[in-house]
Image (cartoon, coloured by chain):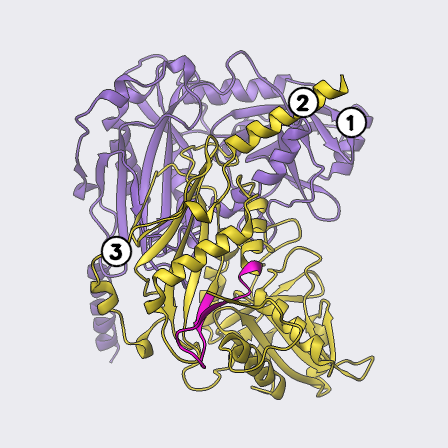
Chain colours: A yellow, B purple
Amino acid sequence: MMGRQQHQHQQKKALQVLSARFISSSDLTIELKTDKSDFENQPKKEDLVFGTTLSDHMLTIEWDKQNGWSPPKIIPYQDLKISPAASCLHYGLQCFEGMKAYRSLKDKDSIHLFRPDKNVERLKNSMRRLAMPGVDFDKDELIKLISELVKVDKDWIPEGEGYSLYIRPTVIATHRFLGVSPPDCLLLYVITSPVGPYYKTGFDPIRLTTDTDCVRAWPGGTGNAKCGGNYAATMKPAAEAAAKGYSQILWLFGENDEVTEVGAMNFFIYLINKETNRPELVTAPLTRGDILPGVTRSSILDLTRSWGDFDVSERYITMGEIKEASDENRLIEAFGCGTATVVSPVSCIQYKGKDISIPAVGELTQRVWDEIVGIQYRKIEAPPCTPDWIVEL
Amino acid sequence: MMGRQQHQHQQKKALQVLSARFISSSDLTIELKTDKSDFENQPKKEDLVFGTTLSDHMLTIEWDKQNGWSPPKIIPYQDLKISPAASCLHYGLQCFEGMKAYRSLKDKDSIHLFRPDKNVERLKNSMRRLAMPGVDFDKDELIKLISELVKVDKDWIPEGEGYSLYIRPTVIATHRFLGVSPPDCLLLYVITSPVGPYYKTGFDPIRLTTDTDCVRAWPGGTGNAKCGGNYAATMKPAAEAAAKGYSQILWLFGENDEVTEVGAMNFFIYLINKETNRPELVTAPLTRGDILPGVTRSSILDLTRSWGDFDVSERYITMGEIKEASDENRLIEAFGCGTATVVSPVSCIQYKGKDISIPAVGELTQRVWDEIVGIQYRKIEAPPCTPDWIVEL
């Protein structure tokens, strides 16, 4: 009896494998664009504006219930044909990643990615949170395909420090169904965009406000997934803050005004801890599920911990504690961080109508910048804590 | 001086009007579909599955910064061409409505909408919450255009009680930009879908669970806007609830487990109030901003208040209060409500691992159903509290 059950189980498993085709880089087909006019007419690298110039090719992989993942394709960049009833347009079934391909400053023909495994892992987590099927693909296969896309468009990667090819993997539900339900079919696609340095002439510190009624994320929500709904909610308060002269919102949570994120970045603050009297670098922890697990955040935590020069804490810090540290001259520096900017120093936080000033660009912000940018552009020897950070193509 | 300022103000206003073209039903152009095969091959009305059959035509109106709203078009239903970098696919910049066109039971050639002004008003509120531009259009113009679309596809409206043409107005950001910012261009479109009665053979009461770590909405979020992100977050917990035998989630909020909504519907509970000892119909209030202002919800509040037969309250009710009412035999009925189902009686709420039973379909649920369905299908004389509810085409 046991033998028969096992046999049935094996049969069932074999059927599942047959019916669920995984992402396979060996099935890739490439259709090259013949028209070179977009490439020839692209802006000079000094004139690039983030997210507006798109390169010549895109990667597409479809998933459906019957066939699983289709053979991946690299095709000329083109508009998508999407049903007006597709659930990506109604029910926010969409998630994405932001990552970059860099040229080494020492050898401009050497191209590499920075921690792509972290991005693909997070993409899979976002898909899980949105009940998207097909999530059990091998992440190395997707990294290989993204690498192929970058190689096809390698001439689009501008040279020089601060320049890179921004990569935007995206998964959308293409299910043509007006009911609210997990989708029957998906499209995973990757587009790329050449980008220049976020800061053209040295750091440009940002002024933050906390004075908004809006809340970015909530425990039990989707704040730790990189999905559309998290961003849609921030446009209006961000525009209101901009109208008052603040460049970003410092998002707070709860009765005690705990600091969570800044704009679309993670947030770090560096201060003298009142109890220990030692310098401490603080960022919000991931445990409550309302913080995006940023790749730059994780890299900064790894690096600064490896230095051992000050305490590094993942804990909630309240605006009250920040205000008190400011009043007692214990506030040293603060910065946002993310793939687009690396680090964004903070010069001011408006809280309850009053500005808390922060020494603009301090030693720590600069050191973090130098170290991460140094690793990303292969200017410096990567420290021992970073064995897999650079993936050469 | 005052005169000159006024003159300048008028000039500025005239320029604004010129540059911001509003939605105008008189600019409508109609391109009819010549191929009748979709119409001829549609399922029998008894076999319609909600949200899967789409009618022949759609309405499209584009907005961009330079030209404002473009002339509206009714065109054959077709896939949309969307840039893979469009912000509707990355940042959740999408909102929608659900409404219906009905045939009168007394005269099948008489077609009407139910409270379309409420839907268009809510669409505009959703657009505002998402910082979408172009929101200051005249809502009557959009209602006229939706009416024209329904008239073009009037043969798609099935006859009979419970049958209708479901209408899905949608606004998406078509801005081709990978930065997080309010969009430069939009597409407003409307598609329609013939639907049958939600209950084929009498009510089918739903079993709810509250046992999830997920939270649908929160103050300062987007719970009162009909935008994609609200729905994306619910697929996973809903699938988990379904696997445990519960058809929907009763969404709670806060430390006291206040009841907010059920699935994608508003929630009503009818009980004997402990303090007054009088029957009371309760639904969550709109004041905190985490409840979708449902059109069916509003209609039920108006109707039941006009009856004057029991107390009607917009207040938060906690699971503790519901549990206590159940223990003390004061719990009478509960139902969800929305455009798709009208009312969905609730037979059970799982809370902290235990099922609270509710008398399945009571007198009040039936009376609310009879009244609303009676008005929607023009079987009964509309009560005095409903002067504008029916809009004849």
Question: Percent x, y for residue B158?
Answer: 34, 17
Q: Quadrant of the C terminus of chain B?
A: top left
The residue shown at (71%, 18%) is A4
Question: Percent x, y for residue A178?
Answer: 43, 33
Amino acid at pointer 1: Ser
Comparing B168 with B8, the one in front is: B168
Name the residue that disc number 2 marks: A7
Quick check: B89 left or right of A57? right
Name the residue that disc number 3 marks: A33
Quick check: B207 left or right of B80? right
Q: For the magenta stretch, what is the residue range? A: A100-117
How far apart are labels 2 and 3 at the CA level?
A: 50 Å
Comparing A366 with A266, the one in front is: A366
The residue shown at (22%, 73%) is B8
Q: Secondary structure at mark 3?
A: loop
How far apart are labels 3 and 1 at the CA level?
A: 68 Å
| Quarter location, residue B277 | top right
Asked if both marks, 2 and 3, belong to the same chain, the answer given is yes
Q: Which mark is residue B27?
A: none
Comparing A136 with A330, the one in front is: A136
From the viewer's perspective, is the residue at label 3 or at label 1 nearer? 3
Comparing A360 with B296, the one in front is: A360
Question: Percent x, y for residue B174?
Answer: 33, 53
Q: In the rendered image of this protein, does residue A376 appear above or below residue A92? A: below
Name the residue that disc number 1 marks: B326
Chain under callout 1: B
How far apart are labels 2 and 1 at the CA level?
A: 49 Å
Q: Secondary structure at mark 2?
A: helix
